[in-house]
Image (cartoon, helix red, strand yellow):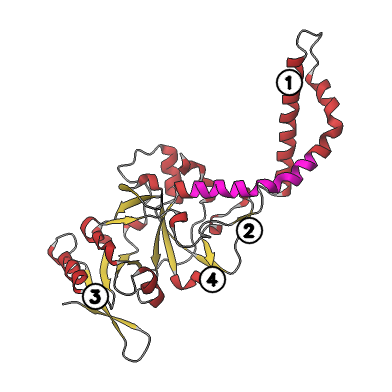
Amino acid sequence: MVLCAIAYYLFMKTPRKLPSTLYKYMAVERSTFFDDWLIRFTQPRALNDPFEMRPYINGYGNPEEMLDIAARNWEKWAHEQYDSYNSNHKGHGDVMQFDIFRAKLEPNRAEMMQEALLRAPEYNHSMAARIEEMMNKGVGVLSLCEHADIGLMWSHYGESHSGFVVEFDARSPFFHQVTPPEHVNASSEDAAAFAEEFGYLRHINYQEQRPSVVVTEMPFDTIMTKGKAWEYECEWRLLMPPDYADVTKQDIKGFPLCLFKVPPNSIKAILLGCNADDDLLKKTLTLRERPESKHIRIEKARIDEREFRLHFETVQ
């Protein structure tokens, strides 16, 4: 499975202290979340940053690894030439031994290997495309924020303050999964990869320069790195394999909508935007009527009279 194929890249656990609470900003249309508790884990290419999980691929390996690859490829080429020679000369005398044939090719070996190494950068683009394809097929992202009162987050993801924010308990088992979901018939190999790479929260690193890597030395933090322009998002991520989704729907952009069911007991509060209308408020209040969600606080944002601040007040 793709899950196993990308396992090499996903190995670094975050050293940063995990907040006790994290937040998900949502638009009004996502109030269907209150009905089914389904939340999307989004493929990297469907996110709004075109650089998402796309470091600059500077090559396949370090100089020693590339030299070794060139040597192995030359040996493979020599065997292919030997097989072709024997095929073309079948029935024309004794078969030439491979060592003798190889010795005839040896004088050009160093030059051919050097030419191959010089052509290696030509494959960087195709390697980058393949890694991107693997990421989009094998990784789904749930993005969460450390704070509920960031104005830009409300504007960009909370439908200009008319949507809502879900306050999650970051200590919930949902954010600390060590085994694949029960409905997944995962092999022992995939289950081991899941425990190592998926199901727990990681924070995003922000920096000015786009990471530059070679494939064989690509640590996980290179694909958990975003540009400084996104630093206001204060982002943490939970990754899940899209194939493990509880519900899959077709997205108009071509990527499947991979929805995972969130346990209501992992939700602490629903925070309505300062521009949220009465329809959203009424729908949110129905949570108090259901046993699984009556514990959830409901608050509404209010703008400060003097400062650029939001205050959240309990809805009675």
Q: Quadrant of the C terminus?
A: bottom left
Q: Give the CA separation, mark 1 to mark 2.
A: 41 Å
Report which residue position mark 2 lands on: 212
Q: Residue 176 at x, y = what percent?
A: 37, 56
Name the residue rendered at 55%, 48% in the picture.
Answer: 131
Residue in the image at 74% along x and 30% along y: 75
Disc number placed over residue 278 in the picture, else none: none
Residue for badge 3: 299
In this rendering, the count of numbered labels is 4
Q: Report the Cα–Cα distance between label 3 and label 1.
A: 76 Å
Magenta-drawn segment: 113-135
Alpha carbon separation for disc pair 4 and 2: 16 Å
Q: Earlier in the sequence, mark 3 or mark 1?
A: 1
Residue 176 in sight? yes
Label 4 and label 3: CA atoms lie apart by: 31 Å
Residue sitting at x 22%, y 74%: 277
**In-image side of 214 versus 232 (left or right):** right
Depicted 2 relative to depicted 56: above or below: above
Residue identified by numbered label 4? 228
Q: Is residue 131 magenta?
A: yes
Q: Which is closer to the viewer, label 1 or label 4?
A: 1
Give the mark, 4 or 3, whose residue is nearer the N terminus.
Answer: 4
Up-down: is 219 above or below 244?
A: below
**Alpha-carbon neighbours of circle 1 within 10 Å: few (<14), some, or many (≥20)?**
few
Verify CB contact (< 8 Å) between mark 2 and mark 3.
no
Whether residue 151 sits left or right of residue 100 in the image: it is: left
Q: Secondary structure at mark 1?
A: helix
Q: Main secondary structure of the magenta part?
A: helix
Helix, strand or loop under label 4: helix
Q: Position of residue 11 (x, y in %)?
A: 51, 52
Separation of disc 2 and disc 3 at Cα? 44 Å
